[in-house]
Structures are given as structure tokens and as C-alpha cells.
Amino acid sequence: MSSRIAQKLILVGAPGAGKGTVAKGLVDRFGLTHLSTGDMLRTAATAGTEVGLAAKVFMDQGQLVPDAVMVKLIAERVQEPDCRSPDGSPRFLLDGFPRTLVQADALQSEGLAPDLVVFLDVPGEAIVRRLSGRRTCPVCGNSHHVEFAPPTVEGCCDRCGSALIHRTDDHEATIRHRLATFEAQTSPLISRYGAVTERVDANQSPQAVLKAAVAVLRAYGVPLLDEKGPLGQA
Ligand code: AP5
Ligand code: MG
């Protein structure tokens, strides 16, 4: 573990491991800018941009979008002011990038290698159940689950009230394809980043997973937004 404060953070985990769910809790507590490449691509697809519509074809089949597209998307996004700390150094929480060794090399060459990688570890058999029951908010990106995290009002996002959707890639055959893609192309990143990777058992309740992830960030010196904040409730 480095004695420096970690500022460039990455969440790695299989589809449905809970990256988006944990990221929301970490953003609330640490004030990090959350960069989910999946959310960025879905927003672009809904807006009908050229990149978004091209990406949707890959996403709907559970395949990765080409590296060159993803590298450009992130290289541009991390230049924005909300990805900088007050002294101008990069500060962000990446979710879903890098997903291949080529993407990791690109991050490295931009001087953006991570200070901390949180690996959310969940056995494959739990994933299908999680993703087939997931309902997502297309407006604010919030995630619910029909069984594990049901919304207060059926079919409506707890955060913004919009109608929840069933993602087109959250059907069983596509989920299994995404899992195979993770094993083949993304899991090698865990050894690549071994020196700065911390494993979190993500096969527990969302509250327990968040509490473990908060403890990891604290151990790497990431300051809470408010040191008197709701850490005990994590
Ligand atoms: P992306 O949107 O990143 O999908 P993913 O990695 O497959 O992960 P998910 O968002 O499906 O799951 P999650 O880990 O965020 O879990 P969540 O918190 O929602 O990417 C989609 C596609 O975009 C890719 O397939 C690819 O095509 C493309 N893409 C994106 N980035 C790319 C890149 N860098 N390169 C190339 N292509 C790229 O939780 C899941 C469900 O489980 C929810 O319902 C939640 O409520 C529930 N849940 C969460 N935690 C728990 C828990 N502890 N216990 C029980 N239920 C839980
Ligand atoms: Mg996600």
C-alpha cells in the first residue's frame, strides 16, 4: 500500500458485481467523480450520437466496444474540471474502464495509472440472478433489483422518480456472454494491477460490500467529504 493519498481509483468486477451500486455509496461519502463507461455509452446511444449508436450494437450483444473508441472517450472525459482535485491533479473513480490490457496501457501512457484498484469479487452463479432482476433508471443511472433492492414505488426510481427499465443486455444469454468476455479480457487486469489491488468480497449484502469498500479507501488515505459523516452507517 502506498503512503500517498489515492486519487485515481478503479472499480473492477464482473458484470453485475455491484460496481455501480458501490460507486454511488463511495461518491456520497468521498465526493469522487464517478466515470462509468457503460453509463456514458448508454447516454450517448439514447442521445443518438454516432459513437453511441455504433456502441449500442456491441453492447446489445454483450461484446466490448473497440478499444480505440473507449480510450478516446475516457481521454477526453478525464480532462474535465470535475476530474481534478483543487491542486489540478487527476482525481476520479473509474467504473468499467480499463476493461482490456490495451486500455490499461493507454491509461498508463496518459500518466493516469491507478493508485488503487478495488476488485469486487462475486462468483459467476450469483451474477445471473443479480442482472436478470436489475431495473435501471435511464435518467439518473440509479440501479434497483426486484428482489434485493426494490424501489419504494414499483417501477419508479427512488432517486429521481423516473420509470425504471430492463437493460437490453440484462437477458440471460447476453449476461453469460458478458461473463465470458470478463473472464477472457478483463480479469487479466487483476494481476496486472496486483500491487495496488484490494479484493472486496462482493457476495454479501450491498451494505456490507459498501462498508468493506469504504474501509479500503480509508486505508489508502482517501478523505471523507465530512469526517463526522455517516461512516458508521456504511
Ligand atoms: P457496463 O454498464 O459497465 O456493464 P457491466 O460491467 O457489465 O456491469 P453492470 O453495470 O452490468 O453491473 P455493475 O457491476 O455496475 O452492477 P450493479 O451495481 O448495477 O457496460 C455495459 C457494456 O458497455 C459492456 O458490456 C460493453 O459492451 C460496453 N463497455 C463499457 N465499458 C467498456 C470498455 N471500457 N471497453 C469496452 N466496452 C465497454 O448491480 C447489478 C444488480 O445487482 C443491481 O440490480 C443491484 O441492485 C444488484 N446488487 C448490487 N450489489 C448487490 C449485492 N451486494 N447483493 C445483491 N444484489 C446486489
Ligand atoms: Mg454498472
Image (spheres, rainbow, N blue to C red):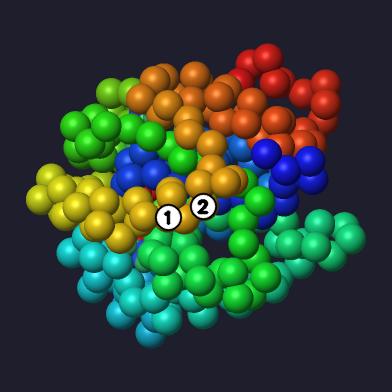
Q: Is residue 22 visible?
A: yes
> Does residue 217 sit above or below 71 in this rendering?
above
Which residue is at 27% across, 32% downward? 123
Amino acid tagged 2: Tyr
Q: Residue 206 appears in which quarter of the rendering?
A: top left
Q: Which residue is mark 2?
A: 193
Q: CB atoms at circles 2 and 1 under 8 Å apart? A: yes
**Real-space CA distance between mark 2 and mark 1, rounded to the nearest whole angstrom:** 6 Å
Residue sitting at the far right? 87
* In this picture, residue 80 sits left or right of residue 125: right
Residue 79, how many percent across, how many down? Answer: 69, 73
Residue 10: x and y in percent read 55, 51
Compared to 31, does 206 lie above or below?
above
Q: Is residue 185 left or right of residue 78?
A: left
**Which part of the image, by quadrant, shows the N terminus?**
top right
Apparent side of residue 36 relative to residue 223 in the rendered image (left or right): left
Q: Residue at x 57, y 46 (%)?
A: 195
Q: Nearer the viewer, residue 212 or 36?
A: 212
Quadrant of the image occupied by residue 50: bottom left
Quadrant of residue 30 within the rendered picture: top right
Label drawn at residue 189: 1
Question: Would you say 41 lies left or right of 166 here?
Answer: right
The residue lying at 43 percent from left, 37 percent from top is 120
* Residue kind at label 1, given as amino acid type: Leu
Q: Who is closer to the viewer here, 197 or 173? A: 197
